[in-house]
Amino acid sequence: MNYNLIRDSLKLIESFEEKMNAHAAYSNDINGFIQWIIDEEHKNFPGHTGINWEGKENGRSPESVISTLIVHMNRYAKNYSKAAMQDSEFSTQDDFIYLINLQAFGEMSKMELIKKNIHDKQTGMQIIKRLLDKNWVSQYNSVEDKREKRISITEKGRLTLQKQMGKIRQATNIVTGDLTENEKTELIRLLNKLEHFHKPVFLEKINSKNILDKLTDKISNEKTKNNE
């Protein structure tokens, strides 16, 4: 038995637990442990300092570039989604995204479905009403809480979604362009990290008047703790 490997593994776990005790930035399970190891490994590499971007010579920040590119990617993806909806019964990409979530994760409450899609309540309710009107989903009272309405996809919804899934998958594949499998994995890692930062903020519904200052302080504290 390789006792050196066991000792090294225990040291890693101990370091992870110390990090968790100081700052719970990762889930306290094997997935959080793996993500922590990946992030620690990335700290050993200084990054690609030779990468250029439009406006860099004039002082444009990487944060500005990232924000702009994310907005652009959202617009590109929406454009491909519109193409995937051609000659279909769907009127918006949200219609089939809601159905995909219900098919993949099963029934859920209205608010669970809305939050999963990062919508405000009013927008989410409008989408759900549209799906109900087309008989693509059904709603019923929760067994645990009669005041709560639960939503599930109907057989008609499944058939409508299945009819268009070929084009939807085609549009999804196009979004990732010519990225290699390793690049896709790395992009997922980075986007998940941003997701874990931003989603709790969205669900907390911080007043827009205070959100910028509050998040600026949060980012500053995160960077300080990561450098400790």
Image (tube, rainbow, N blue to C red):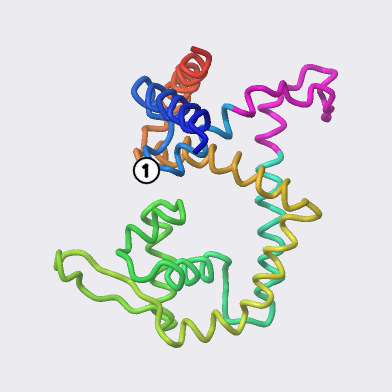
State how many labels appear: 1
Q: Is residue 51 left or right of residue 16?
A: right
Name the foreground residue: 81 vs 1: 1
**Residue type of the residue flagged with mark 1:** Leu
Name the secondary structure under disc 1. Answer: helix
10 Å crowding of disc 1: few (<14), some (14-19), many (20+):
few
Looking at the image, residue 167 lies above or below residue 228: below
When asked about the image quadrant of residue 47, the answer is top right
The answer to whether residue 12 of the structure is visible from this angle is yes
Query: What span is colored magenta in the figure?
Result: 41-68
Please provide percent x and percent y for residue 206.
Answer: 37, 33
Looking at the image, residue 200 lies above or below residue 59: below
Name the foreground residue: 39 vs 90: 39
Q: Is residue 81 left or right of residue 29?
A: right
Please provide percent x and percent y for residue 144.
Answer: 15, 65
Name the foreground residue: 8 vs 189: 8
Q: Tell me, yes or no, whether the highlighted magenta stretch contains residue 179.
A: no
Q: Is residue 193 left or right of residue 208?
A: right
Please provide percent x and percent y for residue 14.
Answer: 40, 25
Residue drawn at point x = 42 percent, y = 32 percent: 208
Q: Is residue 5 left or right of residue 169?
A: left
The answer to whether residue 209 of the structure is visible from this angle is no
Residue drawn at point x = 45 percent, y = 24 percent: 11
Q: Which residue is mark 1?
A: 203
Looking at the image, residue 76 lies above or below residue 104: above
Looking at the image, residue 208 lies above or below residue 173: above
Q: Tell me, yes or no, whether the highlighted magenta stretch contains residue 56.
A: yes
When asked about the image quadrant of residue 70, the answer is top right
Please provide percent x and percent y for residue 94.
Answer: 52, 64
